[in-house]
Image (cartoon, rainbow, N blue to C red):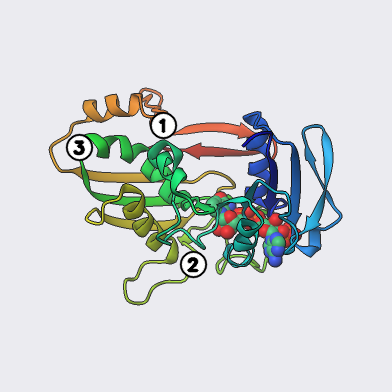
Amino acid sequence: MKSEPVIAIAGVTGAVGAEFIATLNKRGFPVRKLKALASRRSAGRTVEFRGGRIEIEELTERSFDGVDIALFSAGSAVSRRFSPVAVQAGAVVIDNSSAFRMEENVPLVIPEINGRRIREHKGIIAVPNCSAITALMPLWPIHQRNRVRRVILSTYQAASGAGAAAMQELVESTRASLAGEAFEPRVFPHPYAFNVFNHDTRIDLETGYNEEETKVIRETRKIFEDDRIAVGVTCVRVPVLRAHSQSITFACERPIDEEEVRAILASAPGVKVIDDRARNISRCRSRPRARTKSWSAVSAGT
Ligand SMILES: NC(=O)c1ccc[n+]([C@@H]2O[C@H](COP(=O)([O-])OP(=O)(O)OC[C@H]3O[C@@H](n4cnc5c(N)ncnc54)[C@H](OP(=O)(O)O)[C@@H]3O)[C@@H](O)[C@H]2O)c1
């Protein structure tokens, strides 16, 4: 790319859209122009970007003229409809939805694991499911040295994974619960305050897995390029505003001990080992987020 790219964010008002903007800022990513796209509902509102305000436009077939990189996070249906339009207009699409993840010609990329695959794109690069990314980051460096043949994964998934409206539902339903008031859930199929439940996606009646669990199984095999890896997953929603946590148990082809795993993870890109057993904060990092006044916990469990 000769000059700084024109970037479009489709879904700019959502939970992921906000993180796209934050990440562009945090990394000082070069941007000639940012196009802020969302549904008709948001057209005319503004978002803040690098000290200025950008007017949000309705996403249409004409939105991608002159765009170099299009970041999509407006749901699978929107991605399916508009990603080919963006590619046709000359943009490279980076898609956060599940629309194209399992398509053969679409690289499914976690940069620290298979960033080389980006070169093979035909216009669309897919971002994996959040539970898959979190699990595979620490498993991959181990897998490279001693093949991981079996993984049992349990997730504790926050409201943020279901979008801005879900986070709002957690806040409002918790307030209502503490005040002893009734609250009718709008986003989730179950009361969310002070509750845990099976991940709120459709269950495959044959396998018994919900869609989130199925995604993790399939995406792990595609990213690791290993169809033999046995993956058992349980995905559960917990009443936490931000950041998913996971417990991961795995078996390698050859014996592996804790010290070896610790040494591998110490130098693994994107993985931070926190293991302060004396203070009982092993495998857990908590940090306050001023924006939501919540605490987040991220675990890279072994
Ligand atoms: N949240 C996560 O951690 C996460 C992680 C990985 C992937 N994803 C995926 O990313 C996508 C968005 O997730 P999210 O959590 O950001 O959801 P969200 O907070 O509900 O935001 C949805 C965004 O999509 C826009 N949108 C909805 N319908 C649209 C339409 N017809 N045309 C244009 N824009 C439309 C919304 O715009 P309006 O405000 O105008 O309605 C909003 O900006 C989903 O596919 C999700 O599966 C989410």
Q: Residue furthest front?
A: 2
Identify the amino acid type marked 2.
Thr
Residue at 74% x, 43% y: name it: 34
Report if residue 159 is visible in the image. no
- Residue for badge 2: 201
In the picture shown, does residue 184 fall above or below 14? below
**Few, some or many C-alpha atoms within 10 Å of disc 1 (few <14, some 14-19, many ≥20)?**
some
Q: Position of residue 184 (x, y in %)?
A: 66, 69
Q: Foreground: 179 or 212?
A: 212
Query: Taking 11 as reference, is 277 left or right?
Result: left
Checking the image for residue 244, the label placed there is: none
Residue in view at x 43 percent, y 43 percent: 134
Which of marks 3 and 2 precedes in the sequence? Answer: 3
Quadrant (top left/top right/bottom left/bottom right) for the C terminus: top left
Marks 2 and 3, how far apart at CA: 34 Å
Report the residue marked by disc 1.
271
Crowding at mark 2 (Cα within 10 Å: few <14, some 14-19, many 20+): some
Q: Is residue 162 left or right of residue 34?
A: left
Mark 3 Cβ inside 8 Å of ligand 1: no
Q: Position of residue 281 (x, y in %)?
A: 42, 29
Q: Residue at x 29, y 28 (%)?
A: 264
In which quadrant is the N terminus drawn?
top right
Pointer 3 residue = 146
Query: What secondary structure is found at the residue carrying circle 1?
Result: loop
The answer to whether the residue labelled 2 contacts the one labelled 3, judged by CB atoms less than 8 Å apart, is no
What is the residue that sits farthest to the bottom in this orientation?
A: 205
Measured as percent of width and height from the top left, residue 301 is found at 35, 38
Position above or below: 99 against 159 = below
Q: Is residue 183 left or right of residue 296?
A: right
Amino acid type at image mark 3: Asn
Q: Amino acid at mark 1?
A: Val
